[in-house]
Image: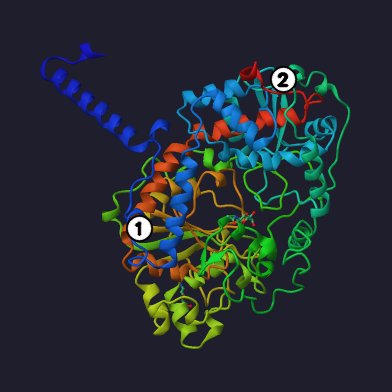
Amino acid sequence: MLPMYRGWQRYVFITALTFLLIYFMLLYRQGTIAPNDITLSPSKFDHATTKERNHPIDHLIKEARLSFKQLLGKHSTNLEQAAQRYRERRGRHPPPGFDQWFKAAKKKNAIVIEEFFDRIDHDISPFWAIDAQDLRVQAHAQPQVIRVRKGKVSFETDDDKRPPWIQLWTALVKEMMPHLPDLDMVVNVMDETRLLVPWEKINGYVAKERTMRKLIDPDVAISEYSGLAGVDNWKKTFEPKWIQSSSNKYWDHLRAACPPDSPARDITSLDSFNGPIEYPEGHMPYMYKGFVQNFTASQDACLQPHLRGMHGTFIESVSMSTLHDLLPMFGGSKLPQNNEILIPGAMYLTSDEFYSGGNSHGSSWASKKNALIWRGAASGGRNKADNWWHFHRHRFVQMMNGTTVKAVEAGDESRGPSFKMLPPEMYSILDRQKGKLGEWLNTFSDVGFNILECFPRVPSGKGYQKTCEYTDPFMEVQKKMPMKKQYSYKYLPDVDGNSFSGRWRGFLRSTSMPLKATIYTEWHDDRIFPWIHFVPFDSSYMDIYGIMDYFLDGHDEEAEWIAEEGRRWAEAVYRREDMMLYVWRLLLEYARVTDDNRERLAFVEDLR
Ligand SMILES: *[C@@H]1O[C@H](CO)[C@@H](O)[C@H](O)[C@H]1NC(C)=O
Ligand SMILES: *[C@@H]1O[C@H](CO)[C@@H](O)[C@H](O)[C@H]1NC(C)=O
């Protein structure tokens, strides 16, 4: 290549190349955290006295930093340590292939902390109560499945016209080859989550699994998976009893999966949504002085009966196909009560900028607008003239609209049917006390739909109308804004859509501060920490004003710190490699639980 260039051209070329190389090296260094260098950036929280900082959010950040630091100390640097931590935490030996997995993790500079994999244990454990052969039959016969045979991966689907989720997941599994045993991996290709086994039944499965958990004598351990030879000639079929109904009311299925003593268990779904919303009274038990302290609990609808009328999932989903039996099915998100096995959402695996935000992660904090931005579709379910104000996204758009809030503050509640104004003493926000919340919102909040997704849809030209007659008096369509443009705002809130929100990874990796409210759990929940890597808020959204009041009123530095800490951490534990490694470990665990020899399959080489 070089001979093409002569004299000064060659000189310029080499200089440019050198600079480019240095630039990329710097970029790489800045963006990653080496596993032997995992630290938390210092912040003034570490040396401030409580007197100077006595806002509840100061307390929550401080507390989160403390427990996060403790966790960082637990990372495994060698195979023996990793296997030992596995045994201590799981009460079993790791599955065969654990050594290859750990080697790959080391090679990819992954931070291995056993706690990051708690979700795998949680999702897989009920399946120990089902006969392994039954699980293989069930998985083999489903229409959407990724198959691993003799180190080769392929997929089957009965619907090629869907978004390419199964293709994206298949590509990820390919990266683990040739280290996986034969398996059939059934995937959920719907937006909505599927399996809801009633509490009594699942509790019985989990209890049974506990009795099976033991550290077997290494002498009886075996390391070869049985494989699926012969399975492909099976004539056995299995038809799950999917429940579909036109009303798509998910609440009653959910509450049967709630513990008998939980607040939601005996609260039935609403007969009609054509009435005012029920708003939670007072702060929720998982809050600290009005702000989310236990993010896991805040995701749990069993603790929040009001959500039956405040989240699209429970109002009317776009489609519903649910099952009250256990079925080995993988999916990108679920309610805490759903029984799918979690893998990273396919949107996190695409390079489509709509979800990934592209390669740019935003400019410096100082150059950003001191404002909050949200754009999206009115998804979340099938919104209609007689129920739209019960949908969560509609509520978020109304609550962040200064004009709407101003009207409600002035006493016209009919202008904001999707929310209620909380008494001023619940959050001490000066503008609220002065009746100027709406005006204050107008100074920083830019939240709006880019399509209203009405039902029934109204044809217009070659497509459909973007707005709906029934919401026209309350909201209007805003122009779309690509994710990278949104990165020029300091604050990026994220709320659920039909299920989880596929833009979350992009937000975490950005230089802006992400905020999150959700009732959906995801694969990453054990490795991304509220109040350190993002700011959590409640799915009622009652705390959003208090949160923004804190950050905008003298705590810009804290916001910048969370934005930066989240970005650095996502570059360390939320890379494509990390998603691959998570699924690899999960699939070893899955191959074991579906194997007739599951109680003897174990990695014990380090003990010999
Ligand atoms: C948070 O809530 C979850 C779910 O309700 C619970 O299991 C967990 O123990 C809680 N964590 C703390 C630290 O209280
Ligand atoms: C904000 O509310 C006003 C009044 O309710 C409405 O006219 C306007 O369209 C809303 N803005 C957006 C972005 O939805």
**Which mark is on residue 218?**
2
The residue at the far left in this view is 8
Q: Residue at x 65, y 31 (%)?
A: 87
Helix, strand or loop status at disc 2:
helix
Q: Is residue 429 above or below residue 307?
A: below
Instruction: Check contact, mark 1 vs mark 2: CB within 8 A.
Output: no
**Which mark is on residue 447?**
none
Residue 228: image quadrant is: top right
Helix, strand or loop status at disc 1:
helix
Q: Which residue is mark 1?
A: 558
User: Which circle's residue, 1 or 2, is located before the other in the chain?
Assistant: 2
Is residue 316 among what the camera can see? no
The residue at the far top in this view is 3
Give whichever of 115, 574 is nearer the camera. 115
Residue 506: image location, x then y, percent: 45, 46
Which of the image's four quarters has the C terminus?
top right
